[in-house]
Image (cartoon, rainbow, N blue to C red):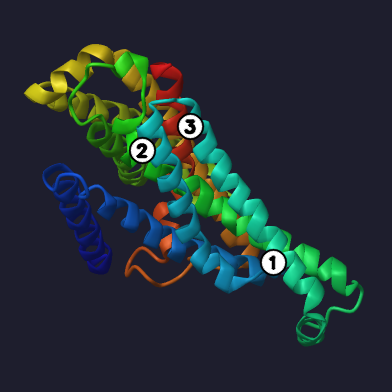
Amino acid sequence: MKKRIFTSIAIVLSLVLLFVLKIFVKDWGLYFFDAFFGVVACFATFELSRLLTKIGLYNYNALSVYFPCLLVAGNLIGLHFVEKSADLFWVLWTILINIGLIVLITLGAFLWGVFNKKAVLNEMNVRKIQNMSRIMFALKKALHTMIAFVYPAFLFLFFVLINHFDVLPFAKFEGVTSNISVFILVSALAIPMITDTFAMLTGSVVGGKKLCPKISPNKTISGAVGGTLWCVLVCACIYLIFGCIGSFKPLMEVLPIWVYLIIVLVGSVVAQCGDLFESIIKRRAGVSDSGKLLPGHGGMLDRIDSYIFIAPFIVLSFLIFAI
């Protein structure tokens, strides 16, 4: 328990430092967050790669480690054109750039398997795979690697878009000079954290029927409901606190609290689905944690499982509202 608390404090302090750099170091301070998200994605993707291997979905571990760096670069290139052109259509192009990178590197991995006959046959021999052709094994290995590209890397790195939300040319936010991305980033990071914390507390106090006993035996229905309700309440307080800060008042006039709380409510449910999704993967792999990187928390994937789905959800939600 002590290890978990100390690790949590270290994570929170790291995020505070990143927000300080983002707010007070002009022009390039926000790129520290991009680097942070990229590093987190690299660790999480590597852990998923190992889980897939344990399940029997063999993949290229090295590609899984480095691929998130390409996605961060793809996001930044797309965002550069968004800022230069002030065209919202480039947001779609940014996402398409990332999808293109996924397809391109997956194709490259497949072709490498096709033309490196000796290496592939040696691996098949070591893994005792006899009822499959070399080409089919190369194809499956490439596709299994693509799974790690998409989950968690592609989905989690929507946080880069959230971090640069200020450059997105939304009509409803036109004239709002406050740092919009700070508020949205705080919300995106807070929703899973608050939901997870209060779900655990509510579930341990109230107890009751299990939510998904075959997937995650410790989670209860009361904990899931309590986590969501407390998340809405705490995020309402966050909204009001930001509303008391002069530079954020114009943003709050544009973004009604009822719209924000609907996003929070649905986002809390989405975050819990992300947690359960990772639990399914771990159960199939026969492990309780994705790794041991974070004392008391398990692996990086264990820590960000709720954030993987929340990132694209937040981007999509504010896109729909702002458009």
Image position, residue 119 (x, y; %): 75, 84
What label does residue 90 carry, if any? 3
- Mark 3 vs mark 2, CA separation in Å: 15 Å
Q: Earlier in the sequence, mark 1 or mark 3?
A: 3
Counting other residues with Cα less than 10 Å from the Cα at mark 2, is it few (<14), some (14-19), or many (20 or more)? many
What label does residue 126 carry, if any? none
Q: Quadrant of the N terminus?
A: bottom left
Task: Left or right? Give the position of 100 relative to 38.
Answer: right
Q: Can residue 202 be spotted in the picture?
A: no
Q: Nearer the viewer, residue 221 or 304?
A: 304
Residue in the picture at 76% in, 73% down: 113
Q: Quadrant of residue 163?
A: top left
For residue 132, above or below residue 210: below
Task: Left or right? Give the position of 201 relative to 280.
Answer: left
Q: Nearer the viewer, residue 223 or 166?
A: 166
- Mark 2 vs mark 1, CA separation in Å: 30 Å
Counting other residues with Cα less than 10 Å from the Cα at mark 1, is it few (<14), some (14-19), or many (20 or more)? many
Q: Can residue 284 be spotted in the picture?
A: yes
Query: Given contact means CB atoms under 8 Å apart, are the residues at marks 3 and 2 in contact?
Result: no
Q: Which kind of residue does numbered mark 3 sit on?
A: Trp
Q: Secondary structure at mark 1?
A: helix
Q: Quadrant of residue 267?
A: top left
Task: Left or right? Give the position of 1 relative to 19.
Answer: right
Q: Which kind of residue does numbered mark 2 sit on?
A: Ile
Q: Secondary structure at mark 3?
A: helix
> Which marked residue is nearer to the observer: mark 3 or mark 2?
3
Q: Which residue is mark 1?
A: 109
